[in-house]
Amino acid sequence: MRPAFRLLAGGADITANIKDRLLSITYHDEAETKSDRLTIRLDDRSRPGSGAHVALPDVGTRLELSLGYEGSGLVAVGSFTVDRIKHSGPPATLEVGATAADMPGPFRSPASRSWDGTTLGAIAREIADAHGYRAKVAAALDAVPVEHEDQTNESPMAFLNRLAARHDGVAKPVNGFLVLAPKGTAKSVTGRSLPAVSLRPERMSRWDFSYSARKEAGEAAKDGTGKAGSGGGVRTVYWDKDAARMVEVTTGSAPYQNARFASSDPRAAKADAASTKNRKDREKAEFSATCPGDPAFQAEQRLVLGGFRPGIPTEWRLTSVEHKLENGAYSMSIKAELFNGAQADAAQPE
């Protein structure tokens, strides 16, 4: 099959205008806080006879990309805002960079204020309204109470992500939305359930699996596979003012790893233990591969591996997918961490 693409700029189809000048299209689809990015490299030499150059896009132009193969249809992969233009040579090359996260200056600028008697969802909505976004808050995180929190010389983006991370969540601007969602649930950041994708060794030009005992919570997996949910647990503490003593909170089973957190709030301590356990379970093993491109692959999906040797886990969470069109070929590079469908509830811990 022959790779194909479609590129719209400001709603106009410019595919035919750039097709004979295209050097490469690279689309990075990232999980969590990293913004999805699009990079387009074009031959910028003047045309013989006319001396014409490729039209230069304005910063702020909206680009829409679709990828796929001739005969099987194209899949829309995202909308991006041009934020970088680079010329280089020889030979003369034009590089256009765009991001899916349109973040106005104040959203990234340090600010200070206090928040009292509210919820995580309410904070996300107030920040979204103040910076021109529409809030999209996952139900699991919406009602998380925030009794008091200080935002001290901290950007709204960094502040909201700091609060979300305590409950194993992430805040991310995507296509005009400010999304607040839990991690590792096989859903897109906008809350849409994502279909699982699968791979076998014969489809890959290269793959790598690794397990790190140092990232295991409490106890390393004895078989060296790091299966999600195996190993030990996480322990944290909070100060019980009424009893005037420290109280332990645990998630998982012994032996326990101590989380670097102490609080006077039992709910916060429980959330920290659950978030740490979930993160350790996901990060203790990694998988990466390079294979022919498939626009159905995207970050946050559940990846199912088949046909590998016994001991390599079969269920993974895609954390990064790079789609690339270059020299008439369409390839993709993926990175994944373990998927755990039974991870602890860090948003509403019991």
Image: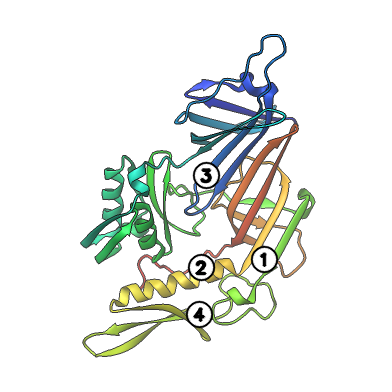
By what rule are the colours in the image chosen? rainbow
Query: Residue 131: where, in percent of width, then height?
Result: 31, 43
The nearer-to-camera label among 1 and 2 is 2
Q: Rounded to the nearest whole Å, what is the CA distance between mark 1 and mark 2?
A: 17 Å
Q: In the rendered image, which residue does mark 1 sit on?
A: 313
Q: Amino acid at mark 3?
A: Asp
At a point 44% along the width and 31% down the height, the residue shown is: 60
The circle on residue 288 is none
- Could you say which is closer to the camera, residue 153 or residue 226? 153
**Front-most of residues 95 and 180:** 95
- Which amino acid is tagged 1? Pro
Select label 2 or label 3 by which is in front. 3
Helix, strand or loop for disc 1? loop
The residue singled out by tag 4 in the image is: 233
Q: Give the farthest residue toward the top.
A: 49
Of 94 and 239, which appears nearest the observer? Answer: 94
**The image quarter in which residue 149 lies:** bottom left
185 lies above or below 227: above
Q: State the residue position of label 3.
A: 36
Q: Amino acid at mark 4?
A: Gly
Where is 118 relative to 98, above or below?
below
Task: Name the N-terminal-most of marks 3 and 1.
Answer: 3
Q: Which residue is mark 2?
A: 279
Residue 135 appears in view: no
Is 253 placed left or right of 239 in the picture?
Answer: right
Q: Along the polypeptide, which appears first: circle 3 or circle 4?
A: 3
Disc 3 is placed on an element classified as: loop
Whether residue 24 sits left or right of residue 267 in the image: it is right
What's the distance in space between the residues labelled 3 and 1, CA to CA?
27 Å
CA neighbours of label 2 inside 10 A, class few (<14), some (14 to 19), many (20+): some
Residue type at mark 2 is Arg
